[in-house]
Amino acid sequence: MGKITNYLYNLIDLHMIISIITNVGLVMLFLGIFFFSYASTVEQDIVTINTNILTTDIIGIILPILTDDAKSNIISKLEYPDMKEEDAKVVEINTQIVNTAYTYLISIFIGTLVLGYIISYYSKNSFYEIMVLNIIILVFIALTEFTFLVLIPKSYISADTNYIRFNFLTKIKEKFIIPDA
């Protein structure tokens, strides 16, 4: 090899570059699969928990001030909306998003592997050793992600019930208080 090529090989740690490239591909693929297969269901649970907290809080504000006749009147007028069409649209859009995301994830993953392999081949680095090391790192990243998701977000209440209560009461006062004439 020429002097310039040798200089560049000495200047750049190709082993580290190959490791970074393949690690990014592995972690990106893992995070995408992890999100769509597990984290999204945890997110749904969190939204459900927060919605129940807020609903219970708002009902706790309203029910004590309503008469029994007003409660009966409200109950008799309540109808559950038919959301089948909207639900089908959400499923269709989400399916398209997931399919597109997987296409990009797999394409980029394959690209990082091919690029890492090509660089390792020409630089005489062991691609196998780099992959083994990166898979070990990925296992620790996966354990960290899973542990964090199981322990922290499910217990964390993101809805600020005091702010929502204040906002709700303010809006009611704005709608029902007749301004001075």
Image: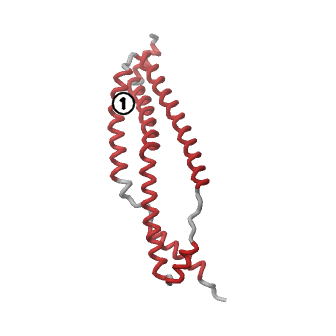
Disc 1 is placed on an element classified as: helix
Residue 59: x %, y % from top left:
47, 73
Farthest residue toward the right? 181
In the displayed structure image, the side of residue 96 where residue 151 appears, left or right: left
Within 10 Å of the Cα at label 1, are there few (<14), some (14-19), or many (20+) other Cα atoms?
Answer: many
In the displayed structure image, the side of residue 64 where residue 135 appears, left or right: left
In the rendered image, the vertical position of residue 78 relative to residue 35, given as above or below: below
Residue at 36%, 19% in the rendered image: 126
Farthest residue toward the front? 76
Q: Which residue is mark 1?
A: 134
In the rendered image, the vertical position of residue 37 relative to residue 22, given as above or below: below
Residue at 42%, 29% in the rendered image: 22
**Picture quadrant where residue 175 is located:** bottom right
Residue 69: x %, y % from top left:
53, 83
Where the C terminus falls, by quadrant? Answer: bottom right
For the image, the number of numbered tags is 1
Residue 92: x %, y % from top left:
58, 45
Colouring scheme, one of rainbow, by chain, secondary structure, one colour? secondary structure
- Please state which amino acid type lies under the numbered disc 1: Asn
In the rendered image, the vertical position of residue 165 relative to residue 158, given as above or below: below
Residue at 59%, 54% in the rendered image: 84
In the rendered image, the vertical position of residue 92 relative to residue 167, given as above or below: above
**Picture quadrant where residue 26 is located:** top left
Q: Nearer the viewer, residue 44 or 80?
A: 80
Residue at 46%, 40% in the rendered image: 32
Farthest residue toward the top? 1
Residue 54: x %, y % from top left:
46, 67
Where the N terminus falls, by quadrant? Answer: top left
Q: Nearer the viewer, residue 131 or 85?
A: 85
Q: Nearer the viewer, residue 64 or 29?
A: 64
**Picture quadrant where residue 136 is located:** top left
